[in-house]
Image (cartoon, coloured by chain):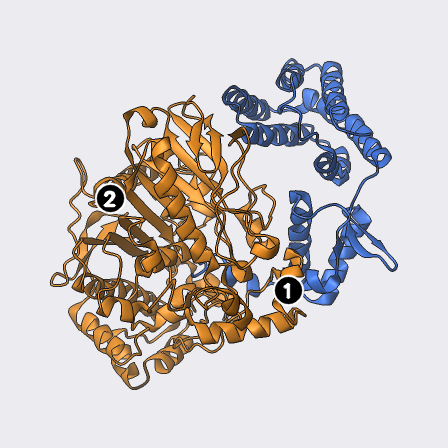
Amino acid sequence: MSAPVETESGLIDGISGRDRSITVYRGIPYAAPPVGPLRWRPPEPPVRAEGVLRAGSFAPMCPQSPRDASRAGIDLPMSEDCLYLNVWAPADAARTGPLPVLVWIYGGGFRAGTGAHPRYDGESLARHGLIVVTFNYRLGAFGFLATPELSAESAQGVSGNYGILDSIALLRWVRDNIAAFGGDPGRVTVAGQSAGAGTVNFLAMSPLAKGLFHRAIAQSHARHSRDPELRYLATSYRTLADAEQAGQTYAREHGARSLADLRALPWQKLVDGRPAFDTGVDSGSTGKPPLFRPVVDGYVLPHGYSGTYTEGRQNDVAYLAGNNLDESGAVPESTFAEYRVRGAAAPNAGAPPIHVTLDAFVAAARHKFGPMAEEFLRLYPAGSDDEAARASNTAVRDNSRISTYLWGTEWTARATRPAYTYFWTHPSPAQGQQPRRASHSSEIEFVFDNLDPGSAAWTDEDREVAATVSAYWANFAATGDPNGPGLPHWPPYAAAVPVVMELGARFAPIPIADPARLDFWKRFFGTQQPW
Amino acid sequence: MEQSSDGGVANESRTSATRSSQAYEELRSLLLSGSIEPDTRLTEADLTRMFGVSRSTMRAVLARLTQEGYVTSEVNRGVRTRSFSPDEARDILEARETLEAALAGWAAERATEEEIDELRATLEAMADARSRDDQAAYSQGNRLFHQQVKAAAHQFTLARAYDTLLYPLVMRQYRNLSAHHPRAGSYEEHQAILLAIVTRNPEAARAAMGHHVATARHALVLK
């Protein structure tokens, strides 16, 4: 057991992890509770705890749809008083440190999630010589509501990025306090998956986050700014004017005529079971982004992706990013029949369409590619439902790899630090998935080296993959380079060499795509509006 | 940003009966999580929006939860989260004592070797949590232990009766937040229950479980 740690939140007493060499600190406040008049305000500094704070229990999760909360399957209440962080640190770190710090940002479409989820248990990763931090940020309307009244009361005349400002406040807390845990504030990595990866990208684009982190890991989010797939995602951001207008409508629908009315509503009235869509966005498919997502407000986020990269305005950090085999509309081949039985799903905020019949595949191609549809269908030919489902999978996977590869050309054009890209292919049994699949989020347990026997039927092969992947992540957090002794070489990104590191079934660079297909997607993106 | 591929897609195509039972489970876990204070008014409109179901579906869900005692529904007061008087709380906890003692007795007769191994593993995890002063992990182990005893009893009617008790809500409302957790002796009481089950001694198992639950009841603030 370590001695209590002195922080701006007070004296914090941790507990031993299941592995006694790790100390765990749960539920440390990093901001004042964002309740009452502080609802929809940038986070304020934490209230210092009296005496010693026993950090033995996770804090409540931020208000979110009960369906999302029950899917998380953990026994935590929801409360608006939710801005807390958790730390896993080697027990001797304060003496032996300073150690690199990995800050994990959960995904969930900016409407769900908690840093307390057992998938993000940092104990095992901390054994690799890291300080691991997880935390909660505000979600849905609480995190991303914009209205003219809210903008008017802010010094910068903006609103709508409270959930991103929470992440920035957390990083300031880490800068000022992590040394007391044995962490090195000069070696901070932000890592996230899905909307968490989106946050990583936004942090890289925000002048407010400059200098607060030094490396970035974006799991399933780094897409070329002209890839229309970007637009159905929660990370497709909004303009301030659009966000304010949508916010006014939202307030009216909830019976509030003023900001005071809105702040007086109990939180239960601001949690929506069916997340509102943003129907005003054309993504080229049935996918629509959720309404509540970050805002290019000229302050937290001065510019969109394209505007940031073209001028080289992003924070110059080492970057690691990639996508998964079975996501963005691709599904394991053995599930085609099941998806056909289910029929076409209603459009779902943030969710990609899945095409498993010839008719759906061809119709979607004509809609999305317009004059280039015939060429697309020649490159991805299909004459039956089964061939169409396979062709759709291939196209989705090519699109993912090509989009990240082309993002790399944008990102690295003005950056001085290296980037690394990956394609995750190891099928996981996590979340009870039958058959196993390399689905969206399936890499998380492996990255955390957190194959808890209670969570799934993990095999020795799974454990080997987890050992390799977590070593890459830990090395990257320590040095900005995932490579290290005993690991297959992962070459840094180079625009001239269209390869990506496969992680999973093999650990080796693979081609991005067949050259004719790569050329097609490049030309198609060229016809699209930059985002 | 996007949902996991096993997420939204599957949920949208379900039948209304499935949606209703899903909303029931979700509202029930929300009530059990302690997110909403006792005696808070819940309007049908709020709940309909919160769970993304129709009014008629929510009405059916509320009727079931009212009948089961998770919420109260009164003319002119709407639906409210349950708040237990000390007498009601005592009544529920006494019933729990009787039921759980009986379940432990059956578990001593009927637990399989595998179930006994699982109970042993849970108790080990509780010992580990206690030695690290990890209260959250201890509570988790504690809940699991009681569920495992219930399952090992292989007594469906008693188990169902036990499941309808509202004691998790009572515990939340009356827990003594200033007392040290876990309570002194709690671990040893679980040990005694397991020993009685391992040695196939139903009488001892009933006594050990009855004593354990009664002691837990006395630790609540039932003024």
Using the image as rendered, state which of residue A464 and residue A44 is in the foreground.
A44
- Where residue B178 sits, quadrant-wise, is top right
Residue B217, image x, y percentages: 76, 26
Q: Mark 2: few, some, or many residues within 10 Å (few <14, many ≥20)? A: many
Pointer 1 residue:
A260
The extreme front residue here reads A155
The extreme bottom residue here reads A371
Say above or below: A27 vs B109: below
Closer to viewer: mark 1 or mark 2: 1
Tags 1 and 2 on a common chain: yes
The extreme right residue here reads B75
Q: Chain of mark 2?
A: A
Q: Mark 1: few, some, or many residues within 10 Å (few <14, many ≥20)? A: few
Amino acid carrying label 1: it is Ala
Q: Is residue B43 left or right of residue A104?
A: right
Residue B76, image x, y percentages: 87, 60
Tell which chain the image draws in orange: A
Q: Is residue A282 left or right of residue A512?
A: right
- Where residue A67 sits, quadrant-wise, is bottom right
Looking at the rendered image, the quarter that the N terminus of chain A falls into is top left
Amino acid carrying label 2: it is Phe
Picture colour for chain B = blue
Say above or below: A257 vs B105: below
CA–CA distance in space, label 1 to label 2 = 46 Å
Pointer 2 residue:
A476
